[in-house]
Amino acid sequence: MNNKVALKFSNLEKRKEKALITYLVGGFPDLITSRQIIETVIESGADIVEIGIPFSDPMADGPIIQQAFSETLQNGIRPVDCLHLINSIKTRYDDTPIVVMTYSNILYANGLNKFLKLSKNSNIDGFIVPDLNFQEADDFLLASKNLGLATIFLTSPNTNLKRLAKICTISTGFVYMVSVYGITGSRNRFEKYTFDSIKKTKAITTKHDIPLAVGFGISTPSDGLKMIQAGADGIIVGSSLIKIIQQHKDDKDTMLKNLGLFVKQLKKVCYS
């Protein structure tokens, strides 16, 4: 499928690069700063941007992202505000795919077809919905296919081969492998099972000709390099970026400077 996410991976492969995917919370710490943050990470080397729509019960996310969600919801940010934010960014950065990572409640409470159509009209390129089981996703898959939206499903180290193969057939942007058991956030180290899982998953994604990106727990360029060396086609970094934003909320210039430097360091390992 020629959605922009798949095309980005294809173009990167031709240049022998791996993908850097950055996760940010839409509207955090406020809408104006959020736009500046997204533009900074794109300018600094992010190939694909994930925007999390704030949600009150983010079961897959760790304490750093939970806190950002909580503050953003308290500020009154709604899903539609995130869509408008993304649309405004795409007027300048149309070549950078932006996907939304959110929960099924957001999709269905707003009317699935209505929300996906609004998202498409807001120039969103695809969706990651961690709590949407593919066995209950027929309507989501059909609507996404009709609108040309990428569908990105998650796997974990204990996903069996049969389920993994099925996920490869319905994911149209990339397959998102969760590197660890548990929620998002920094780890001190990764266990052997993470790298064994990357190799196992990569063998299946290669067979189905779909890229593999690895996320959850990647907090340093060294972490990212290890995932790439194990076979990942892309790395996904979120909590470490949110941590920088939280640390420098009162000094925007320093925040943006540190974010830019960190993203450039992460992108460097994607050339290795």
Image (cartoon, grey):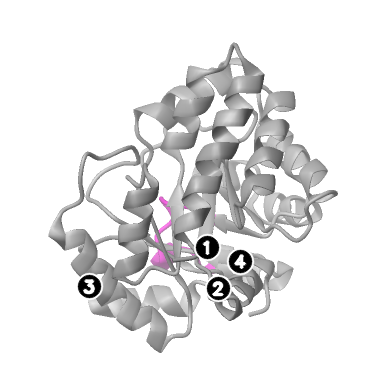
Q: Earlier in the sequence, mark 2 or mark 3?
A: 3
Q: Disc 4 residue type? A: Ala
Label 2 near label 4: C-beta < 8 Å? Answer: yes
Q: Nearer the viewer, residue 165 or 203?
A: 203
Residue 209 shown left or right of residue 14 in the figure: left
Q: How far is the residue under mark 4 from the one under mark 1?
A: 16 Å
Whether residue 130 is in magenta: the answer is yes
Q: Find residue 121 and report its horizontal and vertical position in percent.
A: 81, 54
Q: Find residue 136 and report its horizontal and vertical position in percent.
A: 44, 63
Q: Find residue 140 and report its horizontal and vertical position in percent.
A: 57, 63
* Tag nearer the camera, 4 or 1: 1
Residue 230 shown left or right of residue 76 in the figure: left
Q: Disc 1 residue type? A: Ala
Q: Residue at x 70, y 70 (%)?
A: 148
* Residue that lies at the very extreme toward the right in this rendered image: 91
Q: How far is the residue under mark 2 from the one under mark 3?
A: 20 Å
Q: How far is the residue under mark 3 from the one under mark 1?
A: 25 Å
Whether residue 119 is in magenta: the answer is no
Tell me if mark 4 has few (under 14), some (14-19) or many (20+) residues whose alpha carbon lies within 10 angstroms of its own. Answer: many
Report the number of discs: 4
Q: Disc 2 residue type? A: Thr
Q: Secondary structure at mark 2?
A: loop
From which residue to which does the magenta span run? 128-138
Q: Residue at x 30, y 74 (%)?
A: 201
Residue 83 picture quarter: top right
Q: Which residue is mark 2?
A: 172
Q: Which residue is mark 3?
A: 160
Q: Is residue 3 above or below residue 91?
A: below
Label 1 near label 3: C-beta < 8 Å? Answer: no
Q: Which residue is mark 1?
A: 19
Q: Which residue is mark 4?
A: 150
Q: Residue at x 55, y 73 (%)?
A: 172
